[in-house]
Image (tube, rainbow, N blue to C red):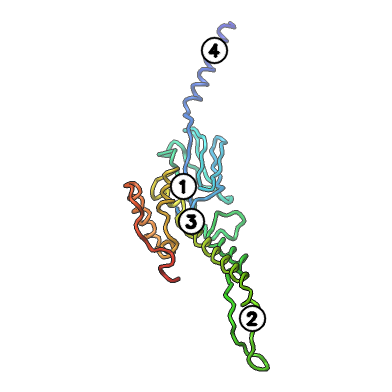
């Protein structure tokens, strides 16, 4: 009798193990974007019905272990999406999704992705004295007793070292602002989506074909994305970037 009970127990264990193995285990990965699909979303929760979870990084990337019987959903700022059945996802290794979030309106909340406009305004507020700096000049002013001159401006005219330092700092801040604007438009999420490049190839492409500030400023969305696609063709052919509008060629 004990022998039969042992055999039944062994068969039950084998059946249970077989059932567990029948539900294939694999990774689900991809990127989460905002509603424009141009900007990645950081700190998005990715949750499966089996209890597994993950959070997107600064590039909007996530990776989570799932089974074919699982469903997953995404949650951002307390707002969850619908559940997606894993078995119905065509390519689990490239499951990208865009959420109904506009990064340009998120400055009213405490948790938000990087926002160039918000950061630029904040930077100009913090360094208002430097951004608003103008070389001191001797200008006559009207006073109650006639025409006079601003004493502070006269003193500042002779503070040569201070004036040079402020002007150099101002130019550095302006250059940093321009670089951040290019980073804002020529970002990894947009380039990755249009080129399908990743890893070292993506880094190499972005270094070699980084546009100038004036091109990034003047080009519309269509022209900018067309440039990226044309740059991809040249990148794959081993060709150098085409000439474009360079900084300083056009007055602001």
Sequence-wise, the earlier of marks 3 and 4 is: 4
- Against 66, is 138 above or below? below
Q: Residues within 10 Å of mark 1 (few under 14, many from 20)?
A: some
Badge 4 marks a residue whose secondary structure is helix
Q: Is residue 141 left or right of residue 82?
A: right
Residue that numbered label 4 is attached to: 8
Label 3, label 1: how far apart the Cα atoms are: 22 Å
Q: Residue at x 50, y 51 (%)?
A: 40
Q: Residue at x 44, y 36 (%)?
A: 87
As measured in the structure, the alpha-carbon distance from the residue carrying label 1 to the one carrying label 4 is: 48 Å
Residue that mark 2 sits on: 154
Q: Nearer the viewer, mark 3 or mark 1?
A: 3
Instruction: Count residues near mark 4 (Cα–Cα under 10 Å), then give few for <14, some for 14-19, many for 20+.
Output: few
Image quarter for residue 137? bottom right
In this view, 39 is above or below 135:
above
- Depth-wise, is mark 1 or mark 2 nearer the camera? 2
Which mark is first along the chain, 4 or 1? 4
Q: Which residue position holds label 3?
A: 183
Question: Which numbered dot is residue 97?
Answer: 1
Q: Nearer the viewer, residue 157 or 15?
A: 157
């Amino acid at each position: 009798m004990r022998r039969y009970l042992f055999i039944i127990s062994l068969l039950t264990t084998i059946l249970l193990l077989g059932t567990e193995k029948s539900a294939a285990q694999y990774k689900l990965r991809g990127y989460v974007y905002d509603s424009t699909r141009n900007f990645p979303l950081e700190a998005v929760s990715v949750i499966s019905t089996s209890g597994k979870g993950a959070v997107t990084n600064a590039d909007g990337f996530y990776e989570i272990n799932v089974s074919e019987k699982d469903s997953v959903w995404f949650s951002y700022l307390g707002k969850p999406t619908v559940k997606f059945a894993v078995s119905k996802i065509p390519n689990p290794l490239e499951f990208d999704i865009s959420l109904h979030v506009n990064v340009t309106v998120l400055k009213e909340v405490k948790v938000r992705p990087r926002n160039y406009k918000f950061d630029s305004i904040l930077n100009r507020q913090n360094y208002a004295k430097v951004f608003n700096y103008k070389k001191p000049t001797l200008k006559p002013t009207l006073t109650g007793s006639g025409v006079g001159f601003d004493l502070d401006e006269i003193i500042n005219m002779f503070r040569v070292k201070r004036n040079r330092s402020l002007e150099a700092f101002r130019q550095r801040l302006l250059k940093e602002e321009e670089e951040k604007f290019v980073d804002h438009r020529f970002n990894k999420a947009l380039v990755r989506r249009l080129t399908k490049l990743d890893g070292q190839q993506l880094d190499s492409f972005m270094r070699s074909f980084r546009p100038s500030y004036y091109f990034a400023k003047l080009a519309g969305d269509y022209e900018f994305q067309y440039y990226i696609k044309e740059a991809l063709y040249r990148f794959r052919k081993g060709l150098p970037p085409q000439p474009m509008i360079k900084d300083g060629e056009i007055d602001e």
